[in-house]
Amino acid sequence: MSVATSAPRNYLTEGTSIRSWLLTTDHKRIALLYLVTITAFFVVGAIAMALIRLELMVPNGTMINAEEYNKMFTMHGVVMVWFFLIPSIPTVLGNFLVPMMIGARDVAFPRLNLASWYVFVTGSLFTMAAMVLGGVDTGWTFYTPYSSLFSNGHVILTIVGVFIVGFASIFTGLNFIVTVHKLRAPGMTWFRLPLFIWATYATSLILVLATPVLAITLAAVALERLFHVGIFDPALGGDPLLFQHLFWFYSHPAVYIMILPGMGVVNEVICCFARKRIFGYEFVAFSSLAIAFLGFLVWGHHMFVAGQSIYSSMTFSILSYMVAIPSAIKVFNWTATLHKGSISLETPMLYLLGFVGLFTIGGMTGLFLASLAIDTHVHDTYFVIAHFHYIMVGGMVSAYLGGIHFWWPKISGRLYSEFWGRVAAGLLFLGFNLTFFPQFIVGYLGMPRRYHVYPPEFQVWNVLSSAGASILAVGYVLPLFYLGWSFFFGPEAGPNPWGATGLEWRTPSPPPRDNFDETPIVTEEAYAYAAPEVAGG
Amino acid sequence: MNEFEWVPPRASVNAIQVDALFYSMVGFTALVCAGVAGAIVYFCLKYRLGSKADRRQLGRRYLPWEFSWTAIPLIIAIGLFFWGANLYFDMFRPPADAQLIYVVGKQWMWKFEHPEGPREINDLHLPAGRAIELVMTSQDVIHDVFIPAFRIHHDVLPGRYYTEWFTPTTPGRYHLFCSQFCGYAHAEMGGTVTVMPPADYAHWLARGNPQPSMAARGFRLFVEVGCSGCHGENAAVHAPKLAGLYGSVVHLSNGTTVIADDRYIHDHIVMPGSQVVVGYRNLMPSFKGLVTEDEILELVAYIKSLEPGERSAL
Amino acid sequence: MRHRRWPVAKSEPLLAHQFSDRTQQVEADSLGMWVFICTEVMFFGALFTGYALYRFTYDAEFRLASHPVSFLLGSVNTGVLLTSSLFMALALHAAQRGDRRQLLGFLWVTAALGVVFLAIKLKDYSDLWDHGLVPALHFAPDLPMPPRAQLFYVFFFFMTGLHALHVLIGVVVLLGLSWLAYRGRCSPADHPTVENVGLYWHFVDVVWVFLYPLFYLMGRSS
Amino acid sequence: MKPDEHVYAVRAYLGVYAALVGLLMATVAIARLDLGAGNAVAALVIGAVKAVLIVLVFMNARFSPPASRVFAGVGFFWLGILLVLTMGDIVTRGWVPSAGE
C-alpha cells in the first residue's frame, strides 16, 4: 500500500531524462514507447479512413481523385495492419504484462526487446517516407504483377519499411516464447498461467513462423520491380498466384496475430468483473493454440476465385470451417463464465462484452466467406470489408482499448473518469455497428472494395456508414483526453483497484523497476476469485 | 435518382441457389448472435453484483457442455461446407453446349467477342435461358469479372485462360464490375450486362455492322502476321500442321504430353520454345507484342475451327 | 601463439538481472537460438516453396538450365561445409572441457573453412557471370538455354546468395567469438555461447545440404 | 544440460562426420545414374538424412531440453505446411472437372 509519505520509486520515476527512456531495457517502459508510437500511427491511419469515408458520401465524389483515393486506402491498410494492429496488444499490453503475469523481473532478452522498438521505428520511417514522397497505390495486399511491374507509386520504399518492421515482430515473438518457457515464477505451472499468457504465446508462435515468409515475399517483389526477372510475371513464366500463396500464408495468420491477444484480454477482464473463475480453462487455453495452428492451414480461402485449383479451394474451405470450432468454444466459454457470477459493468467490461458480441458477428460472417459458393459472390466486396473490420476493429480495437482501460491503473498508477470511460465504450459500440453493418448489405448488393465511385443505388448504405464513422471517431478521441488527463491528474489507484487476481495486481501501481520486491510464489490456479457471498442465500 | 436496394437483383439460376444458401446462413447467424447476446444480457442483469440471484452449485462439471458446443458447431460446419462446395463445383463445370464468349480485360476496359462476330467494349449482350461460358484472360494485370446479379466472380490473369459460366434467366440490365484492384481507374472498369429474350438477342446479333466471325478474323490474322508461312497448307518449313490440333494430345520433346487447349496454343504463340513438339526443332519466333490478347483469342478460334484433314475451314 | 600464457577468467559469467540462476539463463539463451532457427527455416522456406512450384511446372527446362552450374564446385563446397561443421562441434567440445587452446584452434579452422566456402562460391558465381547467366545484371547466355532458364537462375542466386550471406555473418561471428576466447572470456562456464554460435553454424550447413541437391545435382545424368 | 553428458562426444562427432562424407559420395554417385524422377528423390532423401544427423548430433538436439527439441522440429513442420498446401494447388490446378450436363 502506497501511503502518501514519500512516493516509492517506480518504473516511471526511475530516471526521467529522455536518455533514460530511449536507452531503457525495462519491458514496461518499452511498452510505453510502443504505446506512444502506435497511437501516432493509429491517428495517421484514421485520417486516411476519414478521407475515404468522406469521399464515399456521394456516388461520384470529387473531393479526392481516383489516384488520391487509391493512395488513401493503401495508406489506411498498410498503416493500420503493420503499424497499429499487429503490434498493438502484443507490444503494448504484452510487453507490459507478460513478465508481471508470470512473476518475472523482465523478459528473457531485454536488449532485444528495445531493439525491437528501434527496428519498428526505423521501418516505419521508410514507409512514412514513401507516403510523404507521393504514396503508393497497390492496396495493402501488394498483388503482383500490379505492384511489381505496373504501379507508379513508391512500392519499394513501402515494402522496405514493412520488411523491417517484420523483424520487430519476430524479436517480440521470440522474446515472449522464451520468457513464457523459462521465466515463470516458482509454482507458476502451465495450467496456472493467466489465459492472456496462453493467447500471447500462441500469437508469438505465429509472429515467429509467419513473418519471415512475408519478408522474403516482399523482397521478391522488390527484386522483380527493380530488375524484372520474372518471379511473378506470367510473361516470363512466373506465377502471380505464388505471390498470393506466400502473402496469405503470412497475412491470414496475421489476422490471428490481431485477434488472439484480444481474446486473451477478454478472459482477464470477464473473470475479474464477473468475479468468477473462467469456465473451462483448459478448453480456452488449448483453443488459443488450436486457432494459431489452424490459422496456418486456411490461407487459400483468400484465393477461391483467384485461379487456384478447385480441389485446393475445397481443402481450404473445410479447414476454414474448422477454425470456427475453437472460436466458438471461446465465445461459449466466455458467456458461460458470466453464469452465476457477480457482474459489474465497469468500463473495461463494457468494451470486452462489446468485443464478444462484435467478434461473434465477425466470426459468423467468416463462415459465409469460408463457404465456396457465397465467397464466389462476395469476394472482394464490402461484405469482406465489413467482416474483417468486425474482427479487427470491433474485435481487436475494442479489446485493445478495454485492456488499456483495465490495466491503466497499473500502467499509470491512476484512475480515470469512469463516466467518460463508459460513454466512450458506448459510442465505440454504436458507431462501429452503424459504420460497418451497412457494409454487409452493400457488399451483398455487389459493391466492390477499392471503388471511389459507385452506382447511385448503393448511396444510402454508404451515407449510413460515413455517419457511423463520425461517431466512431468521437469514441476513439475521447479516451485520448480523459486518459491523458488521468495520467497526470487522476486520483491514485492503489495496487489493485478492481480487486483482481493475478500477479500483476500484487505489486504497487506503478510497479517498481523489477516488478516485484521479492519473487512471488504461486500456489493457486488463475482467477481464484473468492466465491461470491450469497446475499440472503 | 437513388433507387434504394435491399437485395441484389437475381438473374441467373446460380443466383437463386446462392441466395438460398446465403439466407439460410443469415438465419443461422441471427440465431447464434441473438443467443449469445441474449445470454450475455440476461446474465448481466440476473447476476449483477449484489443481486439476490442463487449462485450455488458452482460445480465443475463443464465437460458435457464443452463437448456439446464443440461437436454441434463441427457438424453444422461440415454441413455448410458441403452445401457451398457442391454449388461451387458446379460453377466450374460448364455444360458442353454452353455458348462461348471471349473476354479480355485490360487497364481499364473489358473487351467481349461473340464467336458469331460482334465485338463489344464494356457492354455485354446475352440471351436469356441459355448457358453462357466466358473464356477470360487479361492483357496486363489481374482483373476480375464480377456480375452481382449472377452471383459470379472470377479473377482474370495475364497469360492464362479461366472460364466462368452461368445461365441468365431474367432479361434486364445488370452491373458488371472489375473487382480485383487493377490501378488508377479500377473503379471505372465496369459496364453493363444486358440480358435479352433469345429472339431479341438473335436480332441484336444480326443488326449493325455485319462482322466476320471470330474464326474468320483469326484466319485473316493467320495470314497477315505470317503464321501461314510455316503452318499453312503449302509451307516449305517443317512445322506442325494445325488441323485437328485443338483438343488433341500433343507429345512434347521432353517426353511429356499435354492437351492442346486454349492455354497451350496461347503459350505457343507468345513463348514458342517452352513446349516443343516431339520431332520438331524450335524454329518459331515469339509473337509476343505482335499480337494482342484478343487477337490471340481469334487465332485460337480459327485453329479450333479446323477439322482434322482440313486445311482451311474458310 | 602456443607460447602465450592464457589469461585466466577473472569472474564468473554475468547473470542478467531478469534471471534467478545460471541454468535458467543458459536454457533461455539456447531456446532463443532454437526459436530463431525456426524463423530462419521459414525465411528460406518461402524460397524453397517458390523453387518447388517452378521446378514442378518447368521440370525439363530447369534440368537443362542447370547444366552450366558446376557440379564439382558444389560438391566440394558441400564437403567444405560439412567439415567446418565437424570442427564447430569439436570447438564446442573443447569449450566444455575448458581447453581454450583447442577451442581457439577449432574456431579458426571453422571460420577458415567458411572463407574457403565463400571463395569457391565466388568462383562459381564468376563462372556463371562469364556464361552470361546472372539475371538482372548480366543475362545473355552464351549457351543454348531453354525459355525459363532465367527463372532458374533467379532462384539459384536468390537462394545461394542468401545462404552465402548467412555464411558470411557466421564467419564474422566466429571471429568475434574466437577473439573473446583469446581474451580469456571462454571458461567452461561460457560454453553455452559457443554452443549457440554452433547452432547457427550447423543450421547454415543444413540449409546448404538441401540447396546442393536442388541446384547442383539435378539433370547430371542426362 | 550437463557438460559431462557429451564430453565423450568426440567419437560421435567423428562417426557422424564419416557418415556425412559417405552420404555425400553416395549422392554424387547416384547423380551420375539415370533414375528419371528417382534422381531428385534420392538426392533429397540423402539430404534429409544428412540434415537429421547434423541436427541430432552436431547440434546436440538429442540432449536439449524438451522445449528446444520441439522448436527444432517446429520450423520444419511449418515449412511442410507451406509446401504441401501450396503444391497441392499447383499439382491439382490442371485437373479440370468433366463437363456438366
Image (spheres, helix red, strand yellow):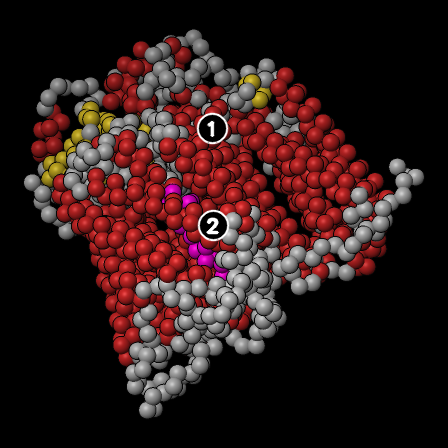
* Residue A295 showing in the rendered view: no
Q: Position of residue A434 (x, y in %)?
A: 21, 55
At 34% from the left and 12% from the top, the residue drawn is B225
Alpha carbons under labels 1 and 2: distance apart: 36 Å
Residue closest to the eye, B58 or A343: A343
Q: Which residues are magenta?
A: A79-99
Q: Position of residue A107 (x, y in %)?
A: 57, 57
At 70% from the left and 40% from the top, the residue drawn is C173
Task: Identify the residue under disc 2.
Answer: A33
Residue A522 placement, left or right of A338: right
Residue A342 placement, left or right of C151: left
Image quadrant assignment for residue A182: bottom right
Task: Identify the residue under disc 1.
Answer: A224
Q: Residue furthest front?
A: A5
User: In what element is the residue under mark 1?
Assistant: helix
At 32% from the left and 23% from the top, the residue drawn is B293
Q: Amino acid at mark 1?
A: Glu
